[in-house]
Image (tube, rainbow, N blue to C red):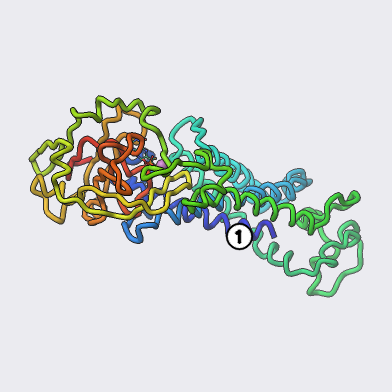
């Protein structure tokens, strides 16, 4: 039963994970992602759409929330199969050898993916390398082993959940290989081989139970349920944020127009007020031209509104915020690029470090909801939300909504 839950759950995790990777537009530029040799594993990459505008909020909310909720199921599943690790003889046939080898990658891969994912959403960046790269490679290794494992075990798992309980649990059958043969359709319940006995997870000499089957399922279900209740609020955002007791950023993002989640503060990234003060300029380049604007000049351009959320790879998102600023296509027009403007490289005043820059694809540039925002919810952007100007793009992962923008470069090779 745990195996079947994981079969469905892990498949969803894998697919939403692949989507999350695609959403970074990793094929567009090394600035967005440096995973080496992704071309082969990234065969499926596509141009991430801007509609529906809540797309990443949903796919990544599902990915992170489900990953956390499945932890008790994964642990219980591993616990239930621990005896199999010591089955004897260790290898019975060629196919058994393949299966056991795949288990190394399966169990190792599962622990690696869950551990790196949880460390990332809890903001412990302790990896020896980029999180994307590790989690992405790990996912492919794991899913390979997962496919092998499922192909070996699916029929057995389905049989186990459709078998009547008293039959499946009759230990005497299992302990005694000389037991009389059962009718043909129940043949697997009698005179089992050593391998069969081990695979059915019934102890040959069971000790008195400390937990009933129902108790074990209940414990795991309750564990997952509690995790769901204290996690999902960070993806739903708004009022529900209060219920997200496990959210590493805390439950209270503050009040007022700028009272929504801040990922990294200006102070944490060493953004100086002198960089964003009166000396701040926006440089727009492209098509062989360049123009430089002051904040007042930017404010004098046509202003537009978009109601869009911020949705982070860490699984948290905000509800829709009311952004106001200049359309990115209008900025492209300043250097003579029309409505068919190309991709743009966005640079912030941030000196190095992750996420100081990003490259947006042409479909994101051309979407009329994509803004260089100067205001949010009726107020000027706060310093922590990217004053004086930040990017906001529908459907994009939060990391591409660059804060403290100072330069836009259209159409150059990136
Ligand atoms: N310059 C810069 N912009 C940035 C980041 C950053 O580290 N530096 N973080 C990004 C990430 S990962 C997210 S989720 C969003 C969060 O925006 P917020 O802090 O306004 O909610 O900002 C993005 N913009
Ligand atoms: Mo993020």
Examine the image and state in which quarter residue 8 appears.
bottom right
Q: Quadrant of ligand 2?
A: top left
Q: Residue 281's x, y, as percent?
A: 17, 33
Q: Does the Cβ of the disc 1 residue fall within 8 Å of ligand 2?
A: no
Q: Residues within 10 Å of mark 1 (few under 14, many from 20)?
A: few
Taking the spot 9% from the left edge, 45% from the top edge, the residue there is 335
Examine the image and state in which quarter residue 276 appears.
top left
Location of the C terminus by quadrant is: top left
Q: Which residue is mark 1?
A: 151
Q: Residue 323's x, y, as percent?
A: 30, 50
Asked if one can make out residue 30 in the rendered structure from this viewpoint, the answer is no
Asked if one can make out residue 128 in the rendered structure from this viewpoint, the answer is yes
Taking the spot 12% from the left edge, 36% from the top edge, the residue there is 292
Who is closer to the viewer here, 225 or 256? 256
Taking the spot 82% from the left edge, 60% from the top edge, the residue there is 192
Residue 357, compared with residue 152, is above or below; it is above
In this rendering, position of residue 119 left or right of residue 75: left
Who is closer to the viewer here, 387 or 25? 387
Location of the N terminus by quadrant is: bottom right
Taking the spot 44% from the left edge, 52% from the top edge, the residue there is 18
């Amino acid at each position: 039963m745990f195996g079947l839950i994981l079969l469905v759950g892990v498949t969803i995790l894998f697919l939403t994970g692949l989507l999350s990777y695609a959403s970074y537009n990793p094929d567009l530029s090394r600035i967005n992602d440096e995973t080496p040799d992704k071309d082969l594993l990234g065969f499926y990459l596509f141009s991430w759409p801007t509609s529906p505008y809540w797309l990443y909020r949903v796919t990544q909310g599902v990915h992170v929330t489900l990953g956390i909720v499945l932890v008790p199921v994964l642990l219980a599943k591993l616990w239930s199969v621990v005896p199999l690790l010591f089955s004897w003889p260790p290898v019975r046939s060629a196919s058994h050898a393949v299966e056991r080898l795949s288990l190394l990658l399966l169990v190792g891969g599962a622990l690696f993916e869950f551990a790196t994912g949880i460390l990332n959403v809890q903001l412990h960046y302790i990896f020896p390398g980029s999180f994307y790269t590790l989690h992405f490679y790990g996912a492919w290794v794991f899913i390979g082993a997962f496919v092998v494992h499922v192909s070996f075990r699916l029929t057995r798992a389905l049989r186990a959940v459709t078998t009547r309980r008293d039959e499946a649990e009759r230990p005497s059958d299992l302990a005694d290989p000389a037991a009389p043969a059962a009718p043909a359709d129940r043949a697997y319940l009698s005179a089992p081989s050593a391998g069969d006995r081990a695979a059915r997870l019934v102890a040959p000499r069971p000790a008195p139970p400390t937990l009933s089957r129902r108790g074990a399922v209940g414990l795991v279900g309750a564990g997952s349920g509690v995790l769901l209740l204290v996690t999902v609020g960070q993806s739903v955002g708004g009022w529900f944020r209060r219920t997200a007791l496990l959210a590493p950023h805390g439950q209270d993002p503050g009040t007022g127009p700028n009272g929504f989640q801040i990922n990294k503060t200006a102070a944490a990234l060493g953004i100086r007020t002198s960089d964003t003060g009166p000396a701040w300029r926006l440089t727009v380049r492209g098509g062989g031209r360049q123009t430089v604007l002051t904040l007042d000049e930017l404010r004098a351009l046509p202003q537009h509104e978009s109601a869009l959320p911020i949705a982070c790879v860490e699984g948290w998102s905000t509800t829709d915020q009311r952004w106001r600023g200049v359309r990115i296509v209008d900025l492209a027009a300043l250097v003579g690029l029309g409505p068919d403007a190309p991709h743009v490289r966005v640079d912030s005043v941030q000196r190095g470090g992750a996420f100081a820059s990003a490259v947006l694809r042409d479909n994101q540039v051309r979407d009329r909801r994509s803004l260089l925002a100067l205001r949010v919810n009726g107020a000027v952007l706060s310093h922590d939300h990217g004053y004086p100007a930040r990017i906001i793009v529908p459907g994009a992962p939060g990391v591409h909504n660059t804060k403290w923008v100072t330069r836009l470069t259209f159409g150059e090779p990136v």
